[in-house]
Image (cartoon, helix red, strand yellow):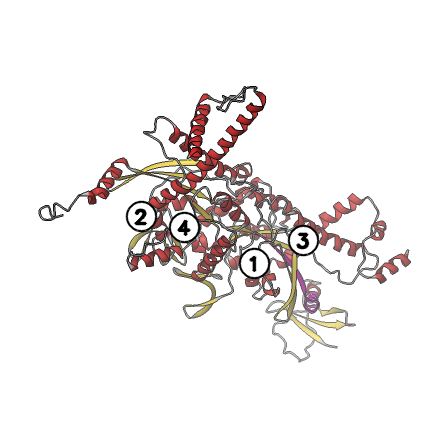
Amino acid sequence: LDGNTGDKEYVGFATLPNQVHRKSVKKGFDFTLMVAGESGLGKSTLVNSLFLTDLYKDRKLLNAEERITQTVEITKHTVDIEEKGVKLKLTIVDTPGFGDAIDNTECWKSVADYIDQQFEQYFRDESGLNRKNIQDNRVHCCLYFISPFGHGLRPLDVEFMKALHEKVNIVPVLAKADTLTPTEVQKKKIKIREEIEQYGIKIYQFPDCDSDEDEEFKQQDLELKESIPFAVIGSNTVVEAKGKRVRGRLYPWGIVEVENSAHCDFVKLRNMLVRTHMQDLKDVTRETHYENYRAQCIQSMTRMVVKERNRNKLTRESGTDFPIPMGPAVSESETEKLIREKDEEVQHFLHL
Amino acid sequence: MSYIYIKISCHVWYVVYRHKRKEYRLMDKTRTVKPPFPGLQTGLIRSADLFGYVGIESVLDQMRRKTVKAGFEFNIMVVGQSGLGKSTLVNTLFKSKVSRKSSTPNYEEKISKTVRLHAVSHVIEEKGVKMKLTVIDTPGFGDQINNQNCWEPIVKYVNEQYEKYLREELNVNRKRRIPDSRVHCCIYFLPASGHSLRPIDVEFMKRLGKIVNIVPVIAKADTLTVEERQEFKERIRQDLEANGIHVYPQRELDEDPEDRILNDRIRASIPFAVVGTDKEHQVNGHKVLGRKTKWGIIEVENVAHCEFANLRDLLIRSHLQDLKDVAHNVHYETYRVRRLNESNMNLSELVLSSWPLQNKMDKCETESHL
């Protein structure tokens, strides 16, 4: 930036990204990641490997008896990570008990309800009066673990993804990929991608590259798209391989290195989640999933209000057009106020 | 008359001759210092040793010849979710393409909506010994979202085979060799999750452990390190004990201390962690069955890598006959006793009851005998 010549043409807003950058660094980022899948697929190990933490240190594994009576729970672990001055508040939402029972009908319901609850919470906060410190607990990404032992997607996988694909960004992951040879990995990936298309499941789509990006970037982007589902291996232990200490798994027949891209797609997944697509995941959550929820919510509230109004029209002599406060079954005044506010908003839209 | 010289020890020989083509008679109990030349008629040799020892020995020989001629039957059932490598493991165990996958021309790896049972038979031969091997597959088990009672078709099948055998046995005019379609062994495949038994595993093994020999195995175990494998097995054994599940070899059936020692060693290492494959690779100049990955080759028959060899030895090389014996003497007998008590009928009534007999002639003959 030459300050002397060209000073007159130079406005100076090119520094905006830097300003934004500085503010974000001060504010810090937050990210909520959900992991879902049957037990024993390495979810906790992968989370620990991705973020180099030990979130599940004091976990107790249930034995068979305890598991028979277990229902699907939703657990949250939050950890603050800082790297080079940038703070990240990471929340991991886990779903222990998913898919473990003999009868797993609708076991995804509690997961869907949780996601909706977070949306509702945000909706209320957003519509509230004090919006300074809204906490964004919405789920930004859901890693769904597909078992490597099957021949592709299982019925439970299909049902789960179909129930949630319009509520959250689903990134399918092929778990425990060290049980597969390279050919098997390729075959399974192709099969799973076909089945995803066949069943109409809308997984998270990577945004297309702009045409003016350089070739290398485009190539990386293409590779990323063709790696779905990511074949991952996680590890909590550090082993010695070829003189280096790496995160890996030690077998009698060799050492699997988690961060070696020839061995698995762990690095691709981590880069995608943290280094390149974190912001996009949050944007899609905000712009698509949350907006869908909000629109549905408002629609149903409008219907509720219209129904009420019609009902009151029939019961009251003076058929007034104003929204009359609801009858005996009054919920909290907060909801009432909210609905009235929203109704006014809807009226406003209708008049537009 | 043909003579047979049987060597008992380096100093003791017995001479036997065939008597009327039915039995062997000991010529004399004798002892000699030098072994006789075959074909050379020596004089009578004397001894002061045991009496009927030789009779038993030769009977073994006769038995061996007869059974080798008749052949063996073995029925093995494989149960587990789809994709756990059941067909591959059975093919690897018997070193031939005996599974449903290899036998059905239009085999498609699709998940079926209900649990069906599918039996495929092959006759395999090794060194003159023939075995009719039947592999019963259970596609659809544990694959649905709601797997409640998915074990029922399997329980029904096992009991049906016992019933068939019982009917045949009770028949007045029975066949010389009753066709044995009873399940001798059921291999249950556990996914290598590394945690513990799942509710469906417990429910299945509880119910089936009472009526058939169950051998649980950890499938696709190449995803477990050695420590993880040990911990997983330990937890499984605890779970089995806590739920009162008796897997093969059952502790109560050990007959003598020798058996007990041998079986204890086996019980300490079940469930076997196996890896199966039909592909061969070159390792150190040898061709081995294995899975080739980017970080190494997993040799299926190498006991340092996985326990496939232990499973094969147990199932085929050492305990195959025992599996059949336990199935016949314990499980079948339990079923028989239960059935006979249940029905409260006497034997002949049971036979006359409306069981569709195999061929009409049998039926007529039965009636005429009364």
Subunit of mark 4? A
Task: Inspect the image, locate mark 1, and give the three-letter code of the amino acid beneath it.
Answer: Glu
Q: Nearer the viewer, residue A309 or A233?
A: A309
Label 2, secondary structure: give it: helix
Q: Which dot marks residue A275?
A: 2
The disc, 2 or 4, on the residue closer to the chain's N-terminal end is 4
Q: Is residue B324 visible?
A: yes
Q: Residue at label 4?
A: A205
The disc, 3 or 1, on the residue closer to the chain's N-terminal end is 1
Q: Is residue A258 visible?
A: no
Label 4, secondary structure: give it: loop
Task: Find residue A223 and report its horizontal and vertical position in percent.
Answer: 37, 58
Q: Residue at label 1?
A: B109
- Is residue B345 within the magenta segment? no
Task: Kindly report the distance in space between the C-alpha atoms of the residues bearing marks 3 and 1.
Answer: 32 Å
Task: Find residue B258 and report its horizontal and vertical position in percent.
Answer: 59, 52
Residue at the outermost bottom position:
B40
Task: Kindly report the distance in space between the C-alpha atoms of the residues bearing marks 2 and 3.
Answer: 60 Å
Mark 2 and mark 1 residues within 8 Å of each other at the beta carbon: no
Q: Nearer the viewer, residue B170 or A163?
A: A163
- Between circles 2 and 3, the one closer to the viewer is 2
Q: Residue at label 3?
A: B327
Subunit of mark 3? B
Magenta residue span? B58-79
- Is residue B70 within the magenta segment? yes
Task: Inspect the image, locate mark 2, and give the three-letter code of the amino acid beneath it.
Answer: Arg
Subunit of mark 2? A
Task: Find residue A232 and report its horizontal and vertical position in percent.
Answer: 40, 52
Label 3, secondary structure: give it: helix
